[in-house]
Amino acid sequence: MYFGSDNSSPAHPSILNALIAANDGYTSGYGNEEAMNNVTKKIRDLFEAPNASVYLVTTGTAANSLALATLTKPWETIFCHRHSHIEEDECGAPEFYTNGAKLTLVDGKNAKICPKNLLDAINLYSQKEVHNIQNGSLSITNVTEFGTIYSLDEMKTLTDIAKAHNLKTHLDGARFANAMIALDCTPAELTWKSGIDVVSFGATKNGCLGVEAVVFFNPEMAWEFELRRKRGGHLLSKHRMLSAQMQGYLKDDLWIGLARKANSECQKLFSKIEKNPNIKIIHPPEANLIFATIPTKLHDKLISNGARYNHWSSQMSPLDVPENETKIRLACSWCTTELEINKLLELFNY
Amino acid sequence: MYFGSDNSSPAHPSILNALIAANDGYTSGYGNEEAMNNVTKKIRDLFEAPNASVYLVTTGTAANSLALATLTKPWETIFCHRHSHIEEDECGAPEFYTNGAKLTLVDGKNAKICPKNLLDAINLYSQKEVHNIQNGSLSITNVTEFGTIYSLDEMKTLTDIAKAHNLKTHLDGARFANAMIALDCTPAELTWKSGIDVVSFGATKNGCLGVEAVVFFNPEMAWEFELRRKRGGHLLSKHRMLSAQMQGYLKDDLWIGLARKANSECQKLFSKIEKNPNIKIIHPPEANLIFATIPTKLHDKLISNGARYNHWSSQMSPLDVPENETKIRLACSWCTTELEINKLLELFNY
Amino acid sequence: MYFGSDNSSPAHPSILNALIAANDGYTSGYGNEEAMNNVTKKIRDLFEAPNASVYLVTTGTAANSLALATLTKPWETIFCHRHSHIEEDECGAPEFYTNGAKLTLVDGKNAKICPKNLLDAINLYSQKEVHNIQNGSLSITNVTEFGTIYSLDEMKTLTDIAKAHNLKTHLDGARFANAMIALDCTPAELTWKSGIDVVSFGATKNGCLGVEAVVFFNPEMAWEFELRRKRGGHLLSKHRMLSAQMQGYLKDDLWIGLARKANSECQKLFSKIEKNPNIKIIHPPEANLIFATIPTKLHDKLISNGARYNHWSSQMSPLDVPENETKIRLACSWCTTELEINKLLELFNY
Amino acid sequence: MYFGSDNSSPAHPSILNALIAANDGYTSGYGNEEAMNNVTKKIRDLFEAPNASVYLVTTGTAANSLALATLTKPWETIFCHRHSHIEEDECGAPEFYTNGAKLTLVDGKNAKICPKNLLDAINLYSQKEVHNIQNGSLSITNVTEFGTIYSLDEMKTLTDIAKAHNLKTHLDGARFANAMIALDCTPAELTWKSGIDVVSFGATKNGCLGVEAVVFFNPEMAWEFELRRKRGGHLLSKHRMLSAQMQGYLKDDLWIGLARKANSECQKLFSKIEKNPNIKIIHPPEANLIFATIPTKLHDKLISNGARYNHWSSQMSPLDVPENETKIRLACSWCTTELEINKLLELFNY
């Protein structure tokens, strides 16, 4: 019964098979290998973006930070949600890679930036001059950190505000495939058609071992990104380790199937617990993550019966967890099984 | 009728006289001149801190940023008020000098950090591990950016929280003398006796041309600061330009007299307008600054009659200025005259 | 006939098998997985360093830069050879990760730092004060970029000079195993017994896909390194991708066998060409790399017959390549075959 | 008998008078004051550059570093002489402000970059790709650190090479006026007519207290410079402290007279000692600085008779000072007197 981070799941066998297939004989490295050409072509096709520049790195933190550093000058600010990965879980990597750009935290329910708050935050800086940090970029996360989804319209509303103020736009797509399934849309719709300039296209959480693509829809920024990636130590010599994974991931729509599986298992679980009076759902679980508070007694029972998931006690998080309750996050991944779900449901309903 | 920034006032004649006196013949530079020895001795005496390290720079931004960079690692955070100079008016200098430390904004009324909010903010990070930015330092501003004053007890409450969580503490004392007069306390009480590790001891706003001291009560950090100052281009060769100013500033309690004058003129003005129904005082004006909203019509009259001060229309600052009103800041400095005050009052009361 | 970069060779099958074995079921990530515990234990044993801290990253550039940033303050200098990887092939990554430390280039024959030159360079800075960048660390590369080897005595001479001047010491061991075989010594002898504080222990070039260890013999520096690694985006979530490779690499002395193979094939090749009058050996080929100049006509013949290796024309490198000659680098890796060697020899000798 | 740094001399009385005159009443700050408008206009006239952007800072290190950071990306290199101020005397400020750009040291006699060496250095990087730091800018110093002068032709040769390789060009003019006098040329000839994009126009050494101008001949880079200056803490609030000095400095050709005085006293001194067999002139003293080696006995006599100047023993600088000799630097400034020169000559000749 594993519902911990989708990062704890293994890679899909097809990914390993792709690695094995790629590990054959000598080949150029540093992204000059044939496999990378294939990946670039495939991603350009998928995103309907024939001029896009495509790069691979090993972590979401690297993808986000390198992308944002390319979009944002040191004296500019990145607008993002208070509960975004770049703010809360990257140990200041965006500040490091940008050489000190500021993250301006914008609030909004369910980890989604509220357009009015964004506008207020932008206006705050827009009125100032040399004394103030300057407006730079907007970073949106979809699926959000709280498992909710921006609709395409909601994304467009935010990127329209950004564009009207000359902000560049970034999508943290660590769970890109899960968002796409939830929205039933195309990659292009989820990105440039929604006003996104650069996307971190995550694959690690959805069945790979460790690979994320950064896709620039404006190739002008590409060379600077390449230098930043190298300078950050993120250009792999035996680069086929990354390109092979991505090739396997995209082949025969594997990535879509895996995300569909994760989301549907999650929805199945949700449909069975949403009316359980013991379980208070905190955010609408629109993709593969459920956030809820449950009685600590129930939590203890779950744990002692072998359930595994992230959790926060009221002591750890006094601001949003009442006493005697526990906040839990249930994550479904590509390898969550019906069996696991049923066992967990049994424990819940008992 | 000038009530604009205290930065727009000239230097006191004694400061210029000190410069002239110091400009005599050859002397060592880079802080090795005799005048600097005198300044160090004088500041150590004033602060009852015989081991303090004392440095001079030309701007408050340099003083704050260099001090904070010495206290805070790149992967740490500086807790400060949302409306602090380091957040709003230094174009990201603290982020630049620290190589990307984060400023965590803490709220509180009247630009004063609320202890409970500080504790919550600290606890937020304390629960995390390598993924999160680490706790680093606390920066307090007294006089605050809104003209209010932390009592010594209020400062101690904050620094006690800081010390309990291993945070270093910094005081932005751009208006140090004004705070000291308002609190009727000693320099030691306003700093290390209140738990402050390093102070930016401002002099520019209070009668100098351009000099701020940074005083470290813990000399262990001094050498690193010296290297950072040099590396930031802030070590002056003809350093007597700074030490002479500071010598003149501290001589015969000039600095205390100047701040007393600024504060008392401000209090005089305040006592005459606080009951004026046209004037809504926004923050308690406890030092030399008054923030208020007035009808825009009144504002227009003031301006057209020659009054000068900072102001924000409801358009510029829609969040806190109602329509048809104007937010104004009246700053008194060492050279504000009774005449100016009376002329302004006349316009107000007419 | 592939004698290009050892980075172009595939991974050894055992490495892939280790990956497959590790890809089983859910596991903690971020280095908290069981496989990483095993790696740490194994490396501590191998290096006879029970307190060593061990970290994995994906590239040599990351390993070197993160290690050097932990050893060196921004206002300090790293002494290294003019022809070192950190100077010539990392696009300024050490400067980026250290926030601007300087690389002081020290000369010496065959890419080996000359002790006298090192001493002179150190003394140059030692006489200065705040105006000058400060002494920080020494970085040695063994196997050098030119395929030569520092003897243990030579290393000790350099690290003794470093220690006498309070410099920290780093070994760039991108080809650690090849150096160890060439020197017929233990890992401990090649590192801390020779005065090394931190080593980049390379595995990618010697049969892995992409993994390098950073080993700190002084655990005090470890926590800072962990934060720097995370902040640099180099902490993998599905960290088993790295620990599994390293486990496979170290198991049953695989790594030693692979390096022995690479070195011995190289020595075989060298013994057959060193007296060839057409071939001028530039540096003593002491590990798995041969640098030589050959007539461009011969070079053209090699290429057109399918030989592959790095090469520089006199136009590209006018300072060290005479006209009508070509500088070549022949690299042997773990998968170089006798057949390839013989075919190349035939072309040479024809 | 003071021949130490020109930084140890006082300010010329006219500079102080200008400060006193400017210290009258309220005025805008941050460079928006009337005095700064006058300075900009005056400098544009002097340099025959009606579109130039002009900025003031307090130190040469700030001027150089901020200018170079505006010209050079973090992943680029600045070509400069091994014996340049930015390399030897700024504690890594250029690396700090550029966020880690590399200084590539180019050799050449008498602290002057040799064109062939520059070309070789540029070509070295030009052949590489993403793995290597990129070509960025060229920084020339005139008067050089060794008191020699580049002719206008020599400057043009270097900047032509730079332009041919897309390098931006910077002139460190800490002793700009002394160079201009030595070359008998116009400010325009010494800068943009010789291919210079940005100049650090020093005034501190030549009679001011602490002010240096940075002049951009291409105004496109100006806004970025303004943000960098603010972010570096180098934008003064009571900016008239700087603009008044510069106004006084430029008024009635004061600056030209002061440099002429310094140079001519130096030439007088030189003409009297150049044939003294005890004195070995090291570099042609073409402006206001003389470098020489003298017997340590003579040095001791000079010191004990009250002469003051910079000096290096053979112990301090074993590479270029023979035993029993002392290397000395005699600097003449605007306030060097005939009397001092004569007294020194007496000691020499006795």
Image: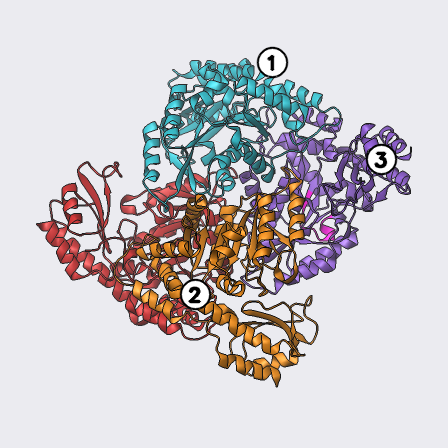
Chain colours: A purple, B orange, C cyan, D red
Residue D186 in which image quadrant: bottom left
**Which contiguous range is marked in magenta?**
A191-200
Q: Residue furthest bottom?
A: B350
Whether residue A166 appears in this view of the structure is yes
* Label 1 vs label 3, nearer the camera: 3
Disc 3 and disc 2 on one polypeptide chain: no
Q: Position of residue A223 (x, y in %)?
A: 57, 45
Secondary structure category for the residue under label 1: helix
Residue at horizontal 35%, vertical 43%? D106
The amino acid pointed to by label 1 is Asp
| C47 drawn magenta | no
Q: Say if B192 sits above or below C184 in the image.
A: below
* Label 2 vs label 1, nearer the camera: 2
Q: Position of residue D296 (x, y in %)?
A: 16, 41
Cα separation, mark 3 vs mark 2, equals 65 Å
Q: Closer to the camera, A254 or D92?
A: D92
Q: Residues within 10 Å of mark 3 (few under 14, many from 20)?
A: some
The amino acid pointed to by label 3 is Leu
Cα separation, mark 1 vs mark 3, equals 47 Å
Tag 2 residue: B255
Q: Is residue B120 left or right of residue B241?
A: right
The amino acid pointed to by label 2 is Trp
Q: Is residue B268 left or right of residue D87?
A: right
Q: Residues within 10 Å of mark 2 (few under 14, many from 20)?
A: many
* Label 3 vs label 2, nearer the camera: 2
Secondary structure category for the residue under label 3: helix
Q: On what subunit does the disc labeled 3 rest? A: A
Tag 3 residue: A298
Whether residue C5 appears in this view of the structure is no
Q: On what subunit does the disc labeled 1 rest? A: C
Asked whether disc 1 touches disc 3, contact meaning CB atoms under 8 Å apart, the reply is no
